[in-house]
Image (cartoon, grey):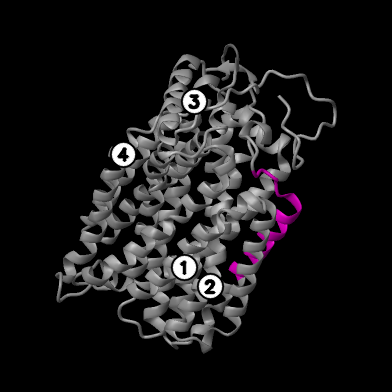
Amino acid sequence: MAVETGRITTDIPARLDRLPWARWHWLVVIGLGTVWILDGLEVTIVGSMSDALKDGDTGLGLSNFDVGLAGAVYVAGACIGALFFGQLTDRLGRKKLFLLTLAVYTVATVATAFAPNPLWYFIARFFTGTGIGGEYAAINSAIDELIPAAYRGRVDVAINGSFWIGAAGGSLLTIPLLDPNVIDAEWGWRLAFGLGGILAIGILIVRKNVPESPRWLFIHGREEEAEEIVRSIERTVEEESGKRLHPVSETITVRQRKAIGLGLIARTVFTLYPRRTILCFSLFVGQAFLYNAFFFTYGDTLTTFLDVDQVGWYLAIFAASNFVGALALSPLFDSIGRVQMITFTYVLSGVLLGVTGFFLDSFTAATLTLMGAIIFFFASAGASAAYLTASEIFPMETRALCIAFFYAIGTAAGGISGPLLFGWLIERASDSGDITKIAIGYFIGAALMIAGGLVEAFLGVRAEGKSLESIAQPLTVEDDEPEAGGRSDDRTAPAPA
């Protein structure tokens, strides 16, 4: 139930958006954005260690299907965690939740290292996923509300692309950890999971210095705390940049509320923004199937069909291409525009993936990895922009839950089915050694990516350089009632109050 506590006119959003880039913003990037490195580390360790986990003596005796199942269980946990922690993020605040979700991840990934049997392993993977899913909701909402509008696109895309730093690191890490001449085979894969927990503790220490979102605070009746935080940020940025900040004249008036009911949030998403809902669903399903299906099982593909013993080098090259793509293309989402860049990256990567499927039997391990690197150079930027889209085109009060909702629905449709499908395809094709039998997975991923790109072309929102409040007004904004038939869901018009 929403409880109104008062009205306030504030210039806080305009003051945050007019800030020049400074070292303080790097604190936000490092403290919050580095969680994607953990996610990349998790996914890559599982993909790289499929053979180690299959060994009944030193591993857990998993089958090919079990490897795919473990990926699906992790993603299922992420979906549930996103929804559970997402609504808490909108209700209780960004900071409480981005500390709590990281703690959940840390405990669960360390528990994975001590798994004595497959059941323990699956349960630990599930709770590791819940922590990561909650992170997506809490972190994306906090980052977008703290980063100036002029930099929001490139920062969001690059941060989400940092997943691949963890992926590359995880790939290289598994090389010595899976070498029995360096570390006993029974302990190598366990150490890999344990190191993820150590990295998370370091991130938690940095993250404690990141403030609560002032935007969330003033809407929830804590305007004095919000004002104090913004003044502190302004002083810090002036000192670090050497620039005197100009005053702002733009203000917004909101009806403060302690809580906003899920009914109002649901009505906002499905009634006021049906086109944006379809857009986000399409983008998330495409990228979730593509990435979870391909990357969760790529190590298994290499070892089963292409006689690769040590997959770490291949995955590291693949991961490096993904990060470079997101980093190199991210400024274009602010300069050229969201719609053009998302359409381009989705459609191109989908077409290339489909072509790869047709000629799958002609690739070696090296050339397939090279082709994958080219495909995902473009796909990584598009996939990262899906999170950017969901986090900026809905009202602030619903932001974290909207990210969680589309992440969960899209990932459940693509991320759970993808690993299970690929695991089944690999299992079925392993006896004959015919790699072409997994091509159908490539074709499905290609079709979903192309479809997502076409939906973006028709329904995409031109959000580059605009304040979050102009893209979608807060539900609590004090404004005139919209005219009948008002355009709440077009590309430029703000939402009604």
Residue 263 placement (x, y as % from top left): 62, 28
Q: Is residue 170 left or right of residue 270?
A: left
Does residue 78 lie above or below 486 as drawn?
below
Q: Is residue 455 magenta?
A: yes
Rounded to the nearest angstrom, the CA distance separating label 4 from label 2 is: 34 Å
Please tell me the numbered disc located at residue 206: 4
Q: Residue at x 55, y 48 (%)?
A: 387
Q: Which three-letter amino acid code belongs to the residue tagged 4? A: Val
Residue 267 placement (x, y as % from top left): 67, 32
Please tell me the numbered disc located at residue 374: 2
Does residue 184 lie above or below 302 as drawn?
above
- Mark 3 burial class by Cα count in 10 Å: few <14, some 14-19, many 20+: many
First-in-chain label (4 vs 2): 4
Rounded to the nearest angstrom, the CA distance separating label 4 from label 1 is: 28 Å
Q: Which three-letter amino acid code belongs to the residue tagged 2? A: Ile
Marks 3/4 in contact by CB < 8 Å: the verdict is no
* Residue located beneath label 3 in the image: 214
Q: Residue at x 24, y 64 (%)?
A: 189
**Is 387 or 207 nearer to us in this picture?**
207
Residue 166 placement (x, y as % from top left): 36, 58
Please tell me the numbered disc located at residue 321: 1
Please tell me the numbered disc located at residue 110: none
First-in-chain label (2 vs 3): 3
Where, by quadrant of the figure, is residue 67 drawn? bottom left
Q: Residue at x 46, y 38 (%)?
A: 138
